[in-house]
Amino acid sequence: MIYSYQHGFSGFAALLTSSQAKKLSDHPDVIHVLPNRILKLKTTRTWDHLGLSPIPTSFSSSSVKCLLHDTNMGSEAIIGVMDTGIWPESKVLNDQGLGPIPKRWRGKCESGEKFNATIHCNKKLIGAKYYLNGLLAERGGKFKTSTVGEFKSNRDAIGHGTHTATIAGGSLVPNVSFYGLARGTVRGGAPRARIASYKVCWNTMQKDGTGPDGSCSTADMLKAYDDAIHDGVDVLSVSISGDLPEDTEVDKLDFVGAFHAMAKGIPVVAAASNEGPKAQTVANAAPWLLTVAATTLDRSFPTKITLGNKQTLYGESLFTGPEISTGLVYWDSESDDNVDVKGKIVLIFDITYKLAKKGVAGVICAQHPDDILDQCDAFPCIYADYTIGTDILQYIRTTRSPTVRIGAATTLTGSPATTKVAAFSSRGPNSVSPAILKPDIAAPGVSILAALSPLNPDAHDGFGLVSGTSMSTPVVSGIIALLKSLHPTWSPAAFRSALVTTAWRTSPSGEPIFAEGSSKKLADPFDYGGGLVNPEKAADPGLVYDMGIQDYINYMCSKGYNDSSISRIIGKKTKCPTPKPSILDMNLPSITIPNLEKEVTLTRSVTNVGPIKSVYKAVIESPLGITLTVNPTTLVFSSEDKKVLSYTVKAKTSHKVSTGYLFGSLTWTDGVHDVKIPVSVQTRIMIKS
């Protein structure tokens, strides 16, 4: 026996042979036997960029109204973080000015290796547990923490969990910078929220012994979900994902755990993964998860490159100086190993660490944009696009003794930098259920400054710049912590709807949002879902697309899961309705039609969470060649008793051939609230035999 699960559902984890598992699954009192699997781990300027304004120093003015003010910066919220643990001494975990721990909290701090619960937990870090039994069972009981610099406790050796937790709910720490870059006040989205850390991911050694490899057992994650439900967290932040394809939602322990958290009213925010810009790579695609894509900030780190002919070009880097002035040489994988690169700046068109052993002074890496800046450890590296790289190469090939001078990076905020969907951010459409839009929302996830474990080689004074959908996920978790303080009775679906329908479709400055990749293009719903999260607008969405347990049951029925499969995840006997529901009718804040042949009609319902007497009118932006007809075109909310109204949408195509996805939107507006959902339609003309 490894674990007993009791708060989300009744079950247990055990180490079994295949024949034992088969025998157990055949027992009439056993609903299902699921295999364990191993998953992988997938901020200063952030909050200014999103318009989540800091609290004024004086609260005396009754006119001060903003989300942080209205929620006392989330002081009653509890954010659960499932990750690699936490570094409790971090400055961002100070509990200065915090009141008593919320009385509903039922969790605890567990002591362990280099972690003393009495000393290391406080009114900020109120929960710290660790889960290792599932991983130990998977690895035959072999895991020496000392071998990989780990701790058998909630202490974070990797730094990933510390980074994500402090993005979501870190306390205010002024005058933080990364070697002078990205200087400012570091804080989480909900800076007075409480943090409960659930360590489910470990710094293990790869099976071939080549190096460390973060691993997370789903049996351990399921126990963490079970505990979090009992402990009383308000939101769960999970920057973890598995490999694609994700096949079925009902046969994955982590999805089962997330479902039961959602069923208990706990939003689960999960990373979209970092496999972009390829299509159909979005992970955590279950509809009960809120899946987050990553964008850049309106911040860059320009680095001056001055060639010997006085030509000045700019790349980007985290190079903090001092200035380097030396020879310049081109090197590629076909270059003769005898090419003298020692002490020189090397131009390359694909990053390679072979140069680390050659004593180079630095590297200029010309590549397609991928938004990730790296310190490259062994030498300074400056990133540029292919055009700049070609200009430098031309200079090298036309000069007898080329030279270059590299200056230290500077921090630039605002114009000309703007919001882009990061190249690495995984894209839709959803490969598991194409009619369910994923990702749901986007948030900043590139070069985010937050706390790190000092054991992480990229840390400086306890902080570091890290990129990934792992970073954009806790941005949204922190925002939901604030929203839940404001709207404690909302369902997880209501929070998703509020975020999606109020999101920015442009950058906060009004510029278009592009998506980085093999070619830069305007972002669409498969890049960023509803758009860039807009915290202040989400606090007052006007209408929400709400859902309950039966909606998710209908979804599973529409997917073709049988009654017994659905009963496994629900935890009780469940029967699908007749006729089978349409997946297009799932009450999501989006419409995705993956195979429109002629026409189809679908239904949505909206719940009024604004003024009791409100009138909304439909505004339609139809995809190219698609006609959208809404009925009725006006929604009248006339009383407290009439808060939920339904409408239908008929989509009809004029295309005579199969198309790719085409995009539009449907907005309900009352003149104050614009409740906008993305519409994605693909025409599929079937050949008749």
Image: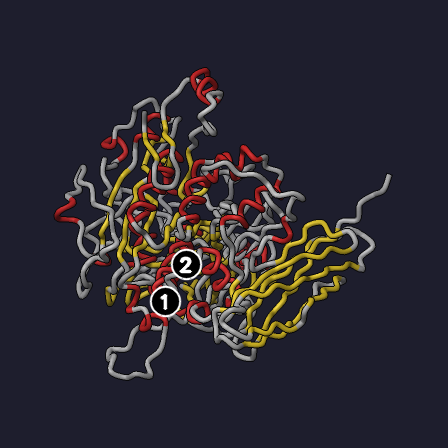
Which label belongs to residue 56?
none
Is the image coloured rainbow, by chain, by secondary structure, or in one colour? Answer: secondary structure
From where the camera sits, is residue 662 visible? yes
- Provide the secondary structure element on which disc 1 rests: helix
**Separation of residues labelled 1 and 2 (CA atoms):** 15 Å
Label 2 sits on what residue type? Val
- Label 2, on which residue? 476
Residue, far left: 119
Question: At x 22% / y 38%, what residue is drawn?
Answer: 153
* Horizontal relation, residue 468 to residue 171: left or right: right
Closer to us: 543 or 58:
543
Please say if 560 is above or below 276: above
Q: Percent from the top left, x then y, of residue 600?
A: 73, 55
Question: At x 32% / y 52%, what residue is drawn?
Answer: 233
Please say if 82 is above or below 496: above
Q: Percent from the top left, x then y, of residue 46?
A: 38, 64
Question: At x 34% / y 57%, what residue is drawn?
Answer: 168
Q: Residues within 10 Å of mark 2 (few under 14, many from 20)?
A: many
Q: Percent from the top left, x then y, of residue 601?
A: 71, 57
Count all numbered tags in the image, as a single digit.
2
- Provide the secondary structure element on which disc 2 rests: helix
Q: Residues within 10 Å of mark 1 (few under 14, many from 20)?
A: some
Q: Quadrant of the C terminus?
A: top right
- Label 1, on which residue? 486
Please say if 217 is above or below 638: above
Label 1 sits on what residue type? Leu
* Quarter location, residue 256: top left
Q: Percent from the top left, x then y, of residue 531?
A: 53, 63
Mark 2 or mark 1, which is nearer the start of the sequence?
A: 2
**Mark 1 near mark 2, Cβ–Cβ under 8 Å?**
no
Q: Quadrant of the N terminus?
A: top left
Residue, far front: 641
